[in-house]
Amino acid sequence: MKAYDLIVVGGGPAGLAAAVEAKKEGVDKVLVLERDRELGGILQQCIHNGFGLHIFKEELTGPEYAERFIDELKEMGIEYRLDTMVLDISDERIIHVISKAEGFVTLVAKAVILAMGCRERTRGALAIPGYRPAGVFTAGTAQRYLNMEGYMVGKKVLILGSGDIGLIMARRMTLEGAKVLGCVELMPFSGGLTRNIVQCLDDYDIPLMLSHTVTDIQGKDRVQGVTVMKVDENRQPIPGTEIQFDVDTLLLSVGLIPENELSKGAGVQLDMKTRGAIVNESMETSVPGIFACGNVLHVHDLVDWVTDESRRAGKFAAKYIANPGGQKEEAIETIPGQGVGYIVPQRIRPSQVDQVLELFMRVRDIYVGQTVVIRVDGKEVQAKRRGHMAPGEMERVKLPVSLFNGPGVKKITVDVESR
């Protein structure tokens, strides 16, 4: 059994940033495990720009952003293994992996960082009626075929779901010569960033149909058409509102699910709202020595925030390795209140917060001119007005530790209020 100080599961943006940060903090033996043929994760297929504005103050493509961290990882001599699948992780941080090069191998680490990312919801999750013809892709799969494998997936396209990948693929397919007839969204608001709605749909005259969904796919061997219907306030199709689209391809951008099968096997407690691990301010899960960051923790809108969060995981993993016992103290719970979908981290130990606590959250609806109110055990400690908030855009709240570092504090609540 080969031993390491730190093993990072996943070589995407989260895993790379965490590994590099841990090495900078003095961790000696770091290993990154990646199941794909190269490092970089989903960034390698995101050839559009818009990455790195916050971290590097530059506008980079996905591969360019990834390369910054890959170069740093290699310069620091951090070990990594490609084409390597992690089979399971125990709560004692014993990891079983398999690869063509080495076969079945058992590893052990003083600390583990989970950075496995997320996967796309598929047609099966939606239960759309019809045969199973060729021409139905998740947006990310189509993106990989187009940008990395060189295959054109269709000529007349409809997109279901307005998440960022779907919006970006609407533009990408158009630039490659396909006709994108529209982007259909079940909810009354888009699930993507405002900038992507403008740059990927509005700039190319691609209509966004809110409160609509796909109710039928025609075609047996290949998609021949798609039926779309308007939905009511309960998201049920309204009879008589059918619209027929003559398309050969349907792209699905209908949500992402954090890949937490390994986390469950290790006994990590999960949050039912994020579908990721419950973590404390140090990104440590309920299992001592196992940390989580990036999209496996909660789905992010910008990779820059993934990097920020993963650096924190790397830093505190290093701290744990140096002092495995740590400091025991009762954690404060963060509570998503009115208008807030979830908050990460879910547990806070004030002694581990360096001056300012940063909370990540998503709101449940579109809010204009509303106030984000923070209460500590029911007492209001901060209220800040926000111009615009939407579920597709992650919100960050900063709270000085002095506002909640008192004896007997139990909970921090965040609400969206009209004032």
Image: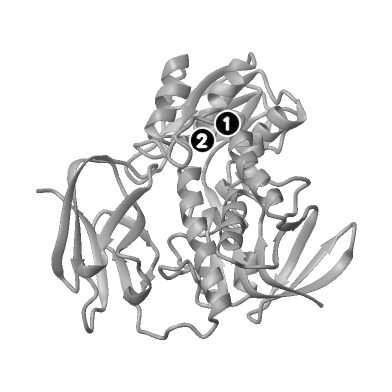
**Eyeballing the image, is 408 above or below 29?**
below
Q: Residue at x 61, y 41 (%)?
A: 68
Percent coordinates x, y for residue 278 in the rendering: 46, 69
Residue at which label 2 appears:
51
Choose the circle earlier in sequence order: 1 or 2.
Answer: 2
Percent coordinates x, y for residue 120 in the rendering: 59, 46
**Eyeballing the image, is 209 above or below 334?**
above
Residue at which label 1 appears:
61
Q: Residue at x 61, y 61 (%)?
A: 23
Q: Which mark is residue 304?
A: none
Foreground of the two, 138 or 144: 144
Residue 10: quadrant of the picture: bottom right
Question: Mark 1 near mark 2, Cβ–Cβ under 8 Å?
Answer: yes
Which amino acid is tagged 2?
Phe
**Eyeballing the image, is 194 above or below 379?**
above
As measured in the structure, the alpha-carbon distance from the residue carrying label 1 to the one carrying label 2 is 6 Å
Q: Residue at x 57, y 59 (%)?
A: 24
